[in-house]
């Protein structure tokens, strides 16, 4: 086989094939993430399924790596997901999110045993708080008492297609002035001593796991189990339906990863390119130059 004036043999083709395979592997690695709850993590603990649910709706999905992204869409037509942030939000960041909610946006805060979800709720002025004591249910459960099924739902647009939620090592919500949307069964209990057994000091009762409250013109939804949004749990009853209800008819869905390790290099590069007109021009010049160089070297000859 000849390419222009050069003879190319099978060793060259094999090397080219290996190089192409390696580049594909690098490309996949650069465009995906291993971060728990990550929007580009397709594994069991990833959150790529939430991105798929949003993609199934007419809404535009934005992966927010900075809270300034909240100002890019009309708040009253937007919903934002904050799922188990790994670090705390600053005053300035919290103020941007508060403005988003008070202007009509819907904010979903899902957290369990990390402190940053509660810290954000405090900064926003919301009343609900996550009680970080593990919740168990040895009667209504999926596989074990550590995966309780929340069986009690309130009539609301967010629960219209939801009869239950399947939880995975959840906490609970202290509702305070908020409205409870979903509760655990009457056979659940807070495992205060962590021994995975019901003790005399622990009582069977129903606990809130999802609440909602108004904040200005917007709404704050608190979920005490971020795991309902991971890929392995999204297909359990009725987690996907609940996620779809949260997305609803919103025009924009923000997946807030501004405080997680979710940083696929390719996604960052594409985002940077999209936001910079000068980089777009430079990229175009490079592509045109490369095509011109290839065309000058002649065409393939077999």
Image (cartoon, grey):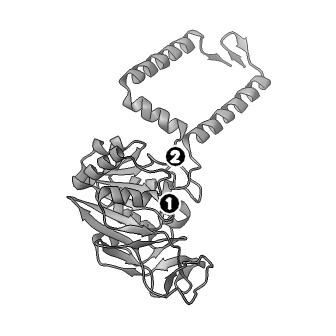
In the depicted view, which residue is nearer to us: 181 or 233?
181
Quadrant where the C terminus sits is top right
Q: Farthest residue in the right direction?
A: 11
**Where is residue 79 shown, x and y percent of the image?**
32, 55
Where 20 sits versus 253, above or below? above
Quadrant where the N terminus sits is top right
Relative to 207, 156 lies left or right: left
Could one spot residue 27 in this view of the protein? yes
Could one spot residue 53 in this view of the protein? no
Between disc 2 and disc 1, the foreground one is 1
Q: Disc 1 marks which residue?
A: 114
In the depicted view, which residue is nearer to us: 281 or 99?
99
Tell me which corner region of the image, top left, top right, bottom left or bottom right, holds residue 121. bottom left
**Where is residue 178 shown, x and y percent of the image?**
29, 71
Tell me which corner region of the image, top left, top right, bottom left or bottom right, holds residue 117. bottom left
Rate crowding at label 2 as few (under 14), some (14 to 19) or many (20 or more) other CA atoms within 10 Å: many
**Residue at screen point 50% across, 60% down:** 114
Name the disc covering residue 262, or none. Answer: 2
Question: SS at mark 1?
Answer: loop
Relative to 3, 133 lies left or right: left
In the depicted view, which residue is nearer to us: 249 or 264?
264
In the depicted view, which residue is nearer to us: 35 or 236?
35
Relative to 167, 278 lies left or right: left
**Where is residue 180 shown, x and y percent of the image?**
33, 75
**Residue at screen point 58% across, 78% down:** 193
Question: SS at mark 2?
Answer: loop
Circle nearer the N terminus (2, 1): 1
Calculate the distance from the C-alpha at mark 2 to the C-alpha at mark 1.
Answer: 17 Å
**Where is residue 95 shown, x and y percent of the image?**
30, 48
């Amino acid at each position: 086989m000849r390419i222009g004036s050069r003879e190319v043999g099978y060793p060259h083709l094999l090397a080219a094939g290996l190089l192409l395979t390696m580049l594909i592997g690098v490309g996949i690695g650069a465009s995906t993430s291993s971060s728990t709850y990550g929007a580009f993590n397709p594994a069991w603990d990833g959150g790529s399924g939430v991105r798929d649910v949003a993609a199934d709706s007419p809404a535009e999905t934005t992966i927010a790596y900075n809270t300034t992204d909240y100002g890019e869409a009309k708040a009253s037509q937007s919903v934002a997901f904050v799922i188990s942030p790994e670090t705390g939000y600053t005053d300035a960041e919290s103020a941007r999110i508060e403005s988003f909610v008070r202007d009509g946006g819907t904010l979903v805060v899902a957290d369990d045993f990390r402190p940053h979800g509660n810290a954000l709720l405090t900064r926003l002025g919301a009343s609900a708080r996550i009680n970080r004591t593990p919740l168990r249910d040895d009667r209504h459960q999926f596989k074990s008492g550590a995966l309780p099924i929340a069986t009690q739902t309130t009539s609301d647009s967010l629960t219209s297609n939801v009869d239950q939620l399947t939880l995975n090592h959840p906490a609970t919500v202290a509702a305070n002035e908020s409205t409870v949307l979903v509760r655990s069964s009457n056979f659940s209990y807070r495992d205060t001593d962590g021994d995975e057994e019901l003790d005399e000091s622990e009582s069977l009762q129903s606990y809130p796991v999802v609440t909602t409250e108004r904040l200005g013109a917007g709404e704050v939804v608190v979920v005490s189990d971020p795991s309902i949004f991971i890929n392995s749990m999204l297909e359990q009853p009725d987690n996907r339906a609940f996620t779809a209800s949260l997305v609803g008819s919103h025009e924009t869905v923000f997946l807030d990863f501004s405080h997680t390790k979710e940083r696929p290099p390719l996604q960052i590069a594409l985002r940077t390119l999209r936001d910079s007109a000068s980089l777009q021009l430079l990229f175009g010049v490079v592509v045109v130059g490369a095509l011109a160089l290839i065309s000058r070297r002649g065409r393939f000859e077999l």
